[in-house]
């Protein structure tokens, strides 16, 4: 699998990482054995970047990864990224206080069973703190040797530049795919300019860009998904109609639909690192095929013809889900 640098001076990792939100029950019931099988598959497939967060299953995702690492022994085969800042406190859902971040970092280190975290993100910004102050807190973790590099999730390009002026920001994590192209309005460019990786979550559009899209019945067990505008009617039916066209194009090109979506993303820049998440080893293998798929200019044009900018019906978040990500366009 092709390799890319995670941040300007970070480790070399596989162009395709793995997003471990699926180790919680976010997209339906998950089992520890199933999650560990996915981690085994990541090693077999050459994936060397795994992303999690303390809030995924309230520590469950980190715990599964830590248990897997302990059972395997030796040096971790992955650069491990995790995140903090989202809480389950109804009175304060976002908390970037230095004391809170220090506590949650120590808890993540314990669950993961590692001496230092390769990449530590602020999951969501707390507007009670200027981003410069939060960056200083993160820089302190680097100085203490608990964290090797720092990042932010779902921030605006202007916020990235402010943070980067305090300490190098290795990565910004944001939703980016053929169905969510807002990062192209400044974030892709700012990351490239600063030597910051853009870690693209939901790179296959929460399955809308795969051969296995979610239908209404599938969503019944997905509390977050079933209230997301893109998966509510009439938007869901419209998006599934585009999915039919997308799958047809992928089949004509002889690749899984997920692989084509991943390949399109990796062609957007050397600093783009997709992190698909799935509970299925078979689906992971489909996505991995896109990591080394070469697309010509005519291939890219055909993709844009089938899924033109703005094709997706419905906002990517509901009003409640938009509570913390920074809007900048």
Image: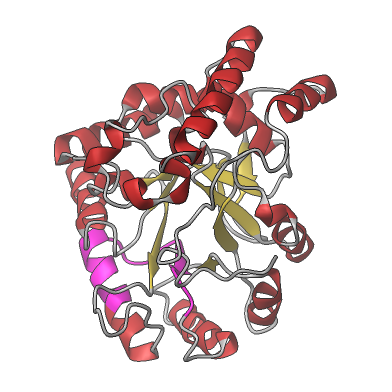
Tell me which corner region of the image, top left, top right, bottom left or bottom right, holds residue 62.
bottom left
Q: Position of residue 283 (x, y in %)?
A: 39, 25
Look at 76% across and 26% down and name the residue there: 305
* Range of magenta residues: 104-125
Look at 41% across and 43% down and name the residue there: 232
Colouring style? secondary structure
Tell me which corner region of the image, top left, top right, bottom left or bottom right, holds residue 270.
top right
Of residues 103 and 25, the one nearer the viewer is: 25
Of residues 230 and 9, the one nearer the viewer is: 230
When the figure is inspected, residue 85 is found, relative to residue 131, above or below; the finding is above
Q: Position of residue 138 (x, y in %)?
A: 48, 80
| On-image quarter of the C terminus | bottom right
Image side of residue 32 versus residue 87, left or right = left
Is 116 included in the stretch rendered in magenta?
Answer: yes
Image side of residue 195 versus residue 315, left or right = right
Residue projecting furthest to the front? 234
* Residue 86 appears in the figure: yes
Tell me which corner region of the image, top left, top right, bottom left or bottom right, holds residue 164.
bottom right
When the figure is inspected, residue 19 is found, relative to residue 326, above or below; the finding is above
When the figure is inspected, residue 80 is found, relative to residue 121, above or below; the finding is above
Q: Position of residue 297 (x, y in %)?
A: 83, 25
Of residues 101 and 77, the one nearer the viewer is: 101
| On-image quarter of the N terminus | top right
Is 277 included in the stretch rendered in magenta?
Answer: no
Look at 36% across and 29% down and name the residue there: 215
Q: Position of residue 182 (x, y in %)?
A: 67, 54
Look at 20% across and 55% down and name the residue there: 60
Figure label count:
0
Residue projecting furthest to the right? 297
* Residue 47 appears in the figure: no
């Amino acid at each position: 699998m092709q390799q890319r640098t995670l941040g300007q001076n970070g480790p070399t990792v596989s162009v395709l990482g793995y997003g471990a939100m699926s180790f919680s029950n976010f997209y339906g019931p998950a089992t520890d054995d199933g999650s560990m099988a996915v981690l085994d598959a990541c090693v077999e497939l050459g994936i060397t970047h795994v992303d999690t967060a303390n809030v995924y299953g309230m520590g469950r995702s980190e715990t599964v990864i830590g248990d897997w690492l302990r059972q395997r022994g030796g040096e971790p085969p992955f650069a491990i990224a995790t995140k903090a800042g989202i809480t389950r406190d109804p009175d304060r859902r976002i908390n970037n206080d230095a004391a809170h971040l220090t506590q949650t970092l120590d808890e993540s280190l314990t669950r993961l069973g590692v001496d230092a975290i390769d990449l530590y993100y602020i999951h969501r910004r707390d507007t009670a703190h200027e981003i410069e102050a939060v960056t200083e807190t993160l820089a302190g973790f680097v100085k203490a040797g608990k964290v090797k590099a720092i990042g932010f999730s779902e921030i605006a390009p202007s916020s990235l530049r402010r943070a980067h002026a305090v300490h190098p920001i290795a990565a910004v994590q944001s939703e980016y795919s053929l169905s969510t192209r807002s990062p192209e309005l400044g974030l892709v460019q700012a990351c490239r300019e600063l030597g910051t990786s853009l870690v693209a979550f939901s790179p296959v559009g929460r399955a809308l860009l795969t051969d296995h899209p979610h239908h209404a019945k599938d969503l019944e067990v997905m509390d977050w998904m079933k209230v997301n505008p893109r998966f509510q009617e009439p938007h869901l039916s419209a998006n599934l109609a585009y999915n039919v066209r997308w799958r047809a194009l992928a089949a004509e090109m002889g690749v899984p639909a997920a692989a084509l979506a991943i390949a399109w993303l990796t062609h957007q820049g050397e600093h783009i690192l997709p992190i698909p998440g799935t509970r299925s080893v078979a689906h992971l293998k489909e996505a991995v095929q896109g990591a080394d798929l070469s697309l010509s200019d005519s291939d890219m044009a055909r993709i844009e013809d089938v899924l033109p900018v703005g094709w997706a019906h419905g906002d990517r978040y509901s009003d409640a889900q938009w509570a913390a990500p920074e809007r900048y366009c």
